[in-house]
Image (spheres, grey):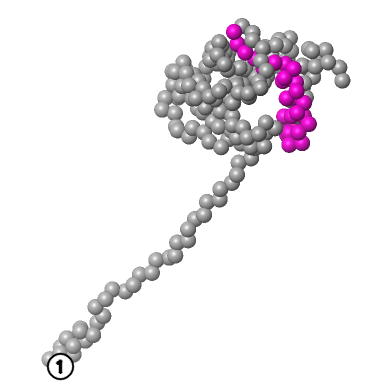
Amino acid sequence: MSELRMLGDSMRFLKPRFKPIQFKPIEFPVHTVIRRPRVGEPTSFDRREPQNRAKPLPKQMVKAVAFDRVRNSPRAIYGSTALVKQIPNTNRVANDTDIWSQQPMTDCDVMEDKLDSLAGGDAYYEQVVEFDDAIDGHKKLYQVIDRETGESVMDFSQKPENAQTVKLDDISYEELKAMREKLILILNDPRTSEKRYIKTAKDLRIIDKFLGIRK
């Protein structure tokens, strides 16, 4: 019995005194594919969750706020709103207000805060859209977006140096003949989408009829 005990004691010193190595599975790095945004696709916007969601303001009230920003200032309204103002007897509907500004990003930020304040909560957010192959060169559009509908209510862009405007009720609007020339350029641009082509052609017909231009 004593011999077995002595053998057991001697075997105890033969046991390994190190812990087995535990191999972890190899973790391969995850590569993020950076995709270049398409023309007119939003490149950045306010992702913050609303702290105090509120109901957006009526469209006419939003337009009144936009007009107040432009009135008696270097800014000017262009696009469909300018067309409707100068040619009121048409079925053309201007859903948003396009504004030329010398500081479009600042104006967008101020107007988003203004609308949120009037709504009593976080009813709007800001979005930036890039047009890197626009006919007038690299262009950014700063938008105020309605959180409820996801649609833009105000668009701000850099005012062109050669912008031609007409003043009505203390507000500057894009002049119709200058607008017509721009619409023709858009129609002749092969990069113009079918949807925009149809809308542009309709606006051109409205202007031509008003100005008495026959083709």
Residue that sits furthest to the right in the current view? 215
What residue do we see at 57% from left, 16% from top? 74
- Looking at the rendered image, the quarter that the N terminus falls into is bottom left
What residue do we see at 45% from left, 24% from top? 122
What residue do we see at 56% from left, 48% from top? 34
Report x, y in % for residue 124. 50, 24
Magenta residues (range): 170-196
Helix, strand or loop for disc 1: helix
Q: As displayed, is residue 7 above or below residue 166?
A: below
**Res 53 quadrant in image:** top left
Viewer can see residue 149: no
Which of the pair 48/25 is nearer the observer? 48
Q: As displayed, is residue 18 above or below residue 154?
A: below
**Res 67 quadrant in image:** top right
Q: As displayed, is residue 68 above or below residue 27?
A: above
- In this image, 141 relative to 123: left or right? right
What residue do we see at 61% from left, 6% from top? 169
- Report which residue position mark 1 lands on: 3
Which of the pair 73/11 is nearer the observer? 73
In the rendered structure, which amino acid carries the disc numbered 1? Glu
Which of the pair 101/11 is nearer the observer? 101
